[in-house]
Image: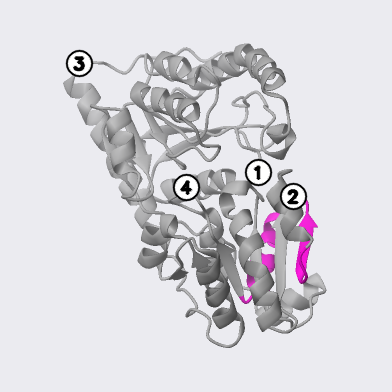
Amino acid sequence: MAHAALRVLLVDVSDRGGIAHYTDCLSSALTSEGVTVSLAALKPRADRGLALAPRRWGPDVSGMARQRLRVRRLAEVAPSALLLGRAVIRAHPDLVHVQTDVVPPVDHLAIGAVKRRAPVVITAHDPEPLEGGEHALERQARRWRAADAVIIHGEGPRQLVESRAPGVPVHVVPVDLPLGGGAVARADARRSLGLDDAPTALLLGLLRPYKGIDLLAEAWPSVADRVPGARLLLVGEPYACAELDRLVRLPGVDLRPGFMAEDDVNRWAAAADLLVLPYHRGSHSGILHRALAVGTPVLASPSLADEVLRTGAGRVVPLDPAAWADALVLALTGSPPPSPPRPTGRDTARATLAIYRQVLRRRAESGLAHRPAVAS
């Protein structure tokens, strides 16, 4: 099949944040490669007639009791499944590419139903679930096993995904999308945000425990003692946790809570001397790519080492408070990592398109014809 005629339905129920932005950038990049892309998402991001059911997530449910959350998720199943099915019928795609959970806790069953009409590729943005635990991992693994192929962003998680989804092709597609906006001068960014010239480190985005908030709480007092006027900005939507409460009480720590518009994300990233990514889990970070876009170097944990080294984003620091304190002091006193290069944006789209072709070829060879859909 010529790729100019390929019809792909991207499915993404996130309404904001890194995955939503990734999906939008991937859509643009695939379109540039000649693919006809439709987006099934929440309003107003969705293409006409392809809106999906909203679901509460992130800080909205982080403090919710387990039983109450379970009841809410069960109530979301029927409308989520109905609108997903309607979107697939209306879009009539050759292939469906799923970016997020759509019908929890039975996403694997929904994917199986979609596969009766078109093959399904899943991108596992965080193969090791950020909430941790065997139950969350197995829930993700059921989704992988139901798909025709799984895309991950680095070699680190490959063994995990392959062991949990034997027989399902797993493809590593490094992120080369322009996930940030245009370049912003640091002085202009600071002026627009009302910031002075203090040495500034930044933790940006959803403020969740897995992002090393506990490690920063251990490391920052030493930094504050050794770097006069040093400032640690925490900018984004906070998850209630004891670690964050502890961190914000430290000298020089400034919490700026709330959801940010796209332009504001870029300004904050540009205003900092460096971004800090001391993640306990995760092999890919959209925030790292924000730093790439504006030329701000990063300090990152070993879980992000592949992406840091591939992109030239900055330095990798062991998950040790003393090591992080030393690295922060060095970076804030005149020896930061070199500024990273900007991404080109085409490699991710081309690699993803090659996977689509492989999946469609295998489906054709297996004798599973594309089932026509009747638009409603």
Q: Disc 1 marks which residue?
A: 16
Say whether disc 2 or disc 3 marks the residue closer to the N-terminus: 2
Amino acid found under the numbered disc labelled 1: Arg
- Kindly state the secondary structure of the residue where label 3 is placed: loop
* Contact? badges 2 and 1 (CB < 8 Å): yes
Q: Nearer the viewer, mark 2 or mark 4?
A: 2
- Image quadrant for the N terminus? top left
Looking at the image, residue 364 sits to the left or right of residue 200; the answer is: left
Mark 1, Cα crowd under 10 Å, few <14 / some 14-19 / many 20+, is some
Q: Nearer the viewer, residue 301 or 9?
A: 301
Amino acid found under the numbered disc labelled 4: Leu
Q: Disc 3 marks which residue?
A: 367
- Indicate the quadrant where residue 203 lies: bottom right
Instruction: Examine the structure image and report whether residue 272 is included in the region drawn in magenta.
Output: yes
Q: List x then y, in percent, for residue 211.
A: 58, 52
Say whether disc 4 or disc 3 marks the residue closer to the N-terminus: 4
Give me the C-alpha separation between circle 2 and circle 1. 9 Å
Say whether disc 2 or disc 4 marks the residue closer to the N-terminus: 4
Q: Which residues are magenta?
A: 250-273
**Is residue 264 visible to the viewer in this orientation of the structure?**
no
Q: Disc 4 marks which residue?
A: 26
Looking at the image, residue 152 lies above or below residue 224: above
Give me the C-alpha separation between circle 2 and circle 4. 22 Å
Q: List x then y, in percent, for residue 14.
A: 61, 37
* Contact? badges 2 and 3 (CB < 8 Å): no
Q: Disc 2 marks which residue?
A: 259
